[in-house]
Image (cartoon, rainbow, N blue to C red):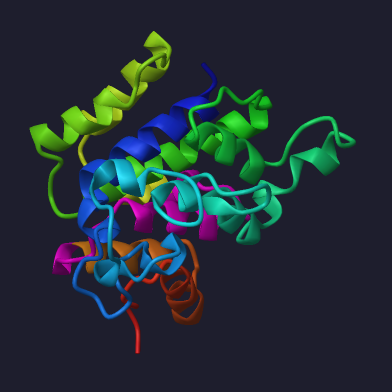
Amino acid sequence: MSMMGTLGKVAMGIIVAKGMSKVMGGNSSGGGLLGGLLGGQGSQRQGGGGLSDMLGGGSGGLGSLLGGASGGGLGGLLGSLAGGGAQNNAEKNNGQAKDFSSMFNDAIQGKEPEATPEQDQQAQIMLRAMISAAKADGHIDEDEKKKIVEHMKDVSDEDAEMVRNELQAPLDIQGLIESVPKGMEQQVYLMSLLAIDLDSKEEAVYLDFLAKGLNISHQESNQIHEKLGAPTLYN
């Protein structure tokens, strides 16, 4: 399995482990961190319920956000934030390869994307960003680790070992910042936000430090939060 495929599986695991309160609606005025893209009204949604409902496709649910139609979903949002370091790989390869956002949409739906080496490198950085952000409140407990690992079926031994090492490693936000290529800053910030409950001072401080380290302005940060229906950091 490619690193892109591993990112899709781990992203789902982290969102389930760390972001369930966001998906369920939370207590923010935005109807939950993912409320703005779920097609529903956060805690006001009626009918259905449970993880199976949220993971369903159709016009709502977490599936709509993470998969979505062509050009949509979370991959589409990532694509809208892409800069010079995450250029459209289809253009660079004369249309012979999908861009990163389309690849990620495939991966998040459990498909095995045929990613280029460059796309796999980008996927690894985003994977590190999500795991790092999941530690922002000080730890990833054993139950959260279990939920993440449960989504890693079919992942290669090498990739699984990398994920386990990242989960066990001490928080190193500065090292993460220094690894982000120019043009991927806002995408990395978005993926980090997805892995955070944003219900503690530690998580807000983490995102503030990350934004400053990636040269993301207060306005840009707030815009990313608003796209996800998340509380903003800055007035």
In the image, 166 versus 48, the foreground residue is 48
Report if residue 195 lies within the magenta region. Answer: yes
In the picture as drawn, the residue positioned furthest to the bottom comes out as 235
**In the figure, 65 relative to 16: above or below?**
below
Give left or right: position of 29 versus 78. left
Report x, y in % for residue 100. Answer: 65, 41
- Whether residue 81 appears in this view of the structure is yes
**In the figure, 150 relative to 81: above or below?**
above
How many marks are shown on the rendered structure? Answer: 0
**Snapshot quadrant of residue 235:** bottom left
In the image, 51 versus 101, the foreground residue is 51
In the image, 4 versus 48, the foreground residue is 48
Residue at (67%, 47%) from the top-left corner?
Answer: 70
Report x, y in % for residue 220. Answer: 51, 75
In the picture as drawn, the residue positioned furthest to the left comes out as 142
Report x, y in % for residue 206. Answer: 27, 61
Residue at (48%, 33%) from the top-left corner?
Answer: 124
**Snapshot quadrant of residue 169:** top left
Report if residue 68 lies within the magenta region. Answer: no
- Whether residue 212 appears in this view of the structure is no
Report x, y in % for residue 22. Answer: 26, 60
Residue at (36%, 66%) from the top-left corner?
Answer: 35
In the picture as drawn, the residue positioned furthest to the front comes out as 47
Magenta range is 177-202
Residue at (15%, 69%) from the top-left corner?
Answer: 201
Give left or right: position of 24 versus 128. left
In the picture as drawn, the residue positioned furthest to the top comes out as 157
